[in-house]
């Protein structure tokens, strides 16, 4: 995979202003605890999404995640050289998951 989980970039930017690094050697970095779906089979396990609010990057779960469950997200098309991205979490699917979680 690539060196970074996410480097948000606006359409007019020539380079990202910052990147989120998932380096395993930094115990204070929570991104190291979230794995990437690297193929279509693993896309079914995606339970976390990467979000941005202004200059703040964060992760949120898409459903209730029991203790001990692996956290998996879609790093997107630019991370894996031989896998585009999951494309399984459509906006309708995401809304259904969030509504289901809110109803609990």
Image: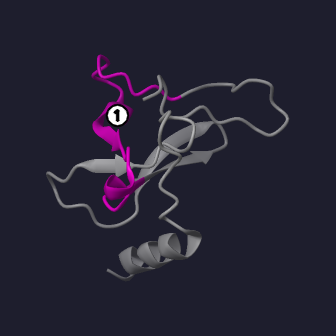
Instruction: Tell me if 70 is positioned left or right of 48 in this view.
Output: left
- Quadrant placement of the C terminus: bottom left
Q: Identify the image's colour scheme: rainbow, by chain, secondary structure or one colour.
A: one colour
Q: Is residue 83 above or below residue 88?
A: above
Q: Closer to the camera, 98 or 42? A: 42
Residue 52 located left or right of residue 25: right
Question: To which quarter of the image does residue 92 belong?
Answer: bottom right
Q: Residue at x 42, y 74 (%)?
A: 97
Residue 84, compared with residue 67, is above or below; it is above
Is 30 in the magenta? yes
Q: Residue at x 53, y 46 (%)?
A: 84
Return the residue found at the far left. 68
Q: Which residue is mark 1?
A: 30
User: For residue 9: magenta?
Assistant: no
Picture quadrant where residue 64 is located: bottom left
- x and y, in percent, of residue 99 in the image: 45, 79
Task: Please name whichever residue, 53 or 21, is drawn nearer the observer in this view of the structure.
Answer: 21
| Residue range (magenta) | 20-48
What residue do we see at 44% from left, 47% from top? Answer: 59
Q: Is residue 46 visible?
A: no
């Amino acid at each position: 995979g690539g060196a970074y989980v996410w480097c948000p970039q606006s359409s007019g930017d020539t380079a990202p202003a910052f990147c989120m690094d998932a380096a395993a050697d930094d115990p204070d970095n929570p991104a190291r605890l979230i794995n990437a779906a690297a193929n279509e089979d693993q896309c079914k396990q995606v339970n976390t999404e990467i979000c941005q609010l202004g200059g703040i990057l964060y992760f949120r779960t898409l459903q209730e995640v029991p203790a001990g469950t692996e956290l998996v997200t879609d790093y997107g098309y630019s991370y894996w050289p031989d896998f585009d991205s999951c494309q399984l979490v459509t906006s309708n699917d995401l809304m259904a998951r969030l509504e289901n979680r809110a109803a609990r």
